[in-house]
Image: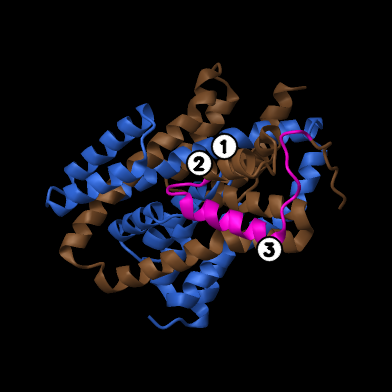
Amino acid sequence: MSETTPAPTPTRSSPPTLIQVFIAFAVISLSGFGGVLYWSRRMMVEERKWLTAEEFNEAYALCNFLPGPNIVNFSVVFGRQIAGTLGALVALVGLLGPPFLIVTFFGVLYAYYGTIDSLQRMFAGVAAAAAGLTLSTSVKMLQPLLKDRFGTSHVMALAAFAGVGVLRWPIYWVLGLLIPLSIMLAWWARR
Amino acid sequence: MKADNGILLTLAVNFALMSLFAIGGANAALPEMHRLAVEVMHWMTDQQFANMFAIAQVTPGPNVIIVTLIGYHVAGFSGALVTTLAMCGPTCVFAFFVGGLWERFKDARWRVVIQAGVVPVSLGLIAASGLVIARAAAQHWVAVAVTVVTFAVTYRLRINPLWIFAAAALLGLAGAI
């Protein structure tokens, strides 16, 4: 599959080497508490200038839309553009390797000490706060939809929310029904 | 915990399948992770699930690493590895091949229609994940209050969430929750 390379712009520097890609994603990963979007943009666009702001937005919009963890997809798409399969692998290992080791270490600690009463209480506090953060992020993401006039998109979003969040049906049934239906409705609206 | 092949296969199949339905990021799969780990398989309690979510949030790195913790809890180190690979592998292959294709048809009508259809469903999923995790964490009325206050503060202000996590941990340590 050949890549259409956009004309170089003044805001972009020369392509990075594999080592640079690995280090960049490891640094992005380790600086990103509670999500890594902010750090990946800062590194890719502002500091290293490997991508222009538009290129970053396009790549990120694509990865938001693909199934699976966004930033993981982003590392694959970016790494592939730089150096094909090897580039994708290097970026991926840079992104996931360090947090994998850290969180596994935490997992070991949790298995040994997780039942200690004072730790349990601290976890209960952090879990409640993390839930609040997740809720506010979801509401922020919903805002573009909330601004639109009420229509089939709202019905589809509500149905997904009710099916998966309230009724606790398996995601497979809910999406298996709603995705084709929602695409059909979108097609119908744009006829 | 000793990892046998049956449990590793269960982890691999379930997380690989789930990842393909995680439209809108790893958090979109949280309700399904919770359903699998707490309700169907009884690998852990609501509280343990909420704890793992909390640990993943305070660990630097992408949110998806909660699956590493779940895998470790269920089947030790090999469980952690298998679950992480299952959650990231298939979608990475997908991103690798579809990435270029999707860019090439950026202005095609079918692409616009698919996107317009999928985005609202993914937003509904993300909202569902907020509800599921808030319910799992709501073990006590003070915990509910912490969730509500964190929601209000992080919604209004651009504040580093780590400060709120630290305050919530202290509140818990002090015995309020």
Residue indicated by mark 1: B121
The stretch of residues the image draws in magenta is A9-36
Question: What is the C-alpha distance between the residues marked 2 and 1?
Answer: 6 Å
Which residue is outermost to the left? B175
Which chain is mark 2 on?
Answer: B
Q: Can you say which quadrant of the picture contains the C terminus of chain A?
A: top right
Disc number lying in front (1 or 3): 3
User: Does B36 sit above or below residue B134?
Assistant: below
Choose between B107 and B163: the one closer to the eye: B163
Choose between B150 and B36: the one closer to the eye: B150
Which chain is mark 3 on?
Answer: A
Q: Residue at x 78, y 34 (%)?
A: A9
Badge 3 local density, few (<14 within 10 Å), some, or many (20+)? some
- Indicate left or right for B38 with B21 as reference: left
Residue indicated by mark 2: B125
Amino acid beneath label 2? Leu
Amino acid beneath label 3? Leu
Give the image location of residue A130, x and y in percent.
34, 46
The image quadrant that residue A92 belongs to is bottom right
Is residue B151 covered in magenta? no
Which chain is mark 1 on?
Answer: B
Residue A89's label in the rendered image is 3
Element type at marker 1?
helix
- Indicate left or right for A100 with B45 as reference: right
Choose between B71 and B160: the one closer to the eye: B160
- Indicate left or right for A86 with A92 as reference: right
User: Does A127 sit above or below residue A85?
Assistant: above
